[in-house]
Amino acid sequence: MRHVIALICLGLILCASIASAELQTATFTSTTPLTIPDSPGGPGTAVTQTMTVDLDYYIQDIRVYIDVAIVQWSSDLRIWVISAWDTELELFHIAEGGEPATNPMGWYPTDFTPYHDMTQWHGEGGGGVWTIVCQDWSEGGGDSVLNEWRVEIGYEDTVPAEGRTLTSVKSLFE
């Protein structure tokens, strides 16, 4: 009986220490300009840019920042981000998220409402290669430029992520 009580007390202490762990944040930034070519009509050429995130912890909170210079309007633009675990989420879907008509600059989900729910990234490992994809969807207006994008990951540093890719996680069950 004393062992059972000791194990219960130990479990409560561990739970209390985990619950009181403070959320840390790390921000990763790419400032390499990416030209988003104007569409010839319909879906234009999708352009991508990658960024290596050096963080061996699981995502508990996340924000993505974009700064786009648009020649005339944003209503024909789509932007999505692919996590290091290949989870693809659309942020900017043909101006459905409260973005300004020109030059959207700000954080998802703080300043703008993402098209897809970003909590789908929660629980994934943050480290690895992240990709942003940008595409123009209608003719006229000229090329746009993604000036900068950032990924800010909230994590607890008490539990490091073990696998960086979905393939490495799947291999544990084979």
Image (cartoon, rainbow, N blue to C red):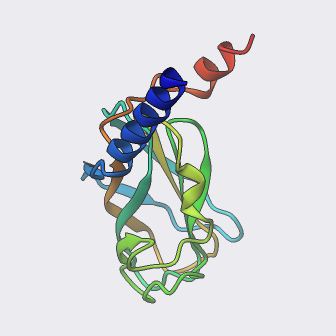
Left or right placement of residue 79 versus residue 70 in this view: right
Vertical comparison of 78 with 4: above or below: below
Q: How many marks?
A: 0
Vertical comparison of 28 with 9: above or below: below
Q: Is residue 32 visible?
A: no
Which residue, as the protein is rendered here, is positioned at the far front?
Answer: 1
Which residue is at 51% across, 43% downward?
Answer: 83
Q: Measured from the top left, where is residue 90 in percent x and y?
A: 60, 62
Quarter where residue 96 is shown: bottom right
Camera-side residue of 45 and 10:
10
Left or right placement of residue 147 versus residue 112 in this view: left
Query: For the N terminus, which image quadrant?
Result: top right
Left or right placement of residue 66 versus residue 86 in this view: left
Q: Is residue 89 visible?
A: yes
Quarter where residue 12 is shown: top left
Which residue, as the protein is rendered here, is positioned at the far right?
Answer: 174
Which residue is at 37% across, 43% downward?
Answer: 18
Q: Measured from the top left, where is residue 32 in percent x and y?
A: 27, 50
Left or right placement of residue 52 versus residue 88 in this view: left
Camera-side residue of 6 and 158:
6
Camera-side residue of 145 and 49:
49
Query: For the C terminus, which image quadrant?
Result: top right
Q: Measured from the top left, where is residue 171 in percent x and y?
A: 66, 13
Which residue is at 49% across, 34% downward?
Answer: 8
Q: Measured from the top left, where is residue 165 in percent x and y?
A: 55, 26
Vertical comparison of 115 with 124: above or below: below
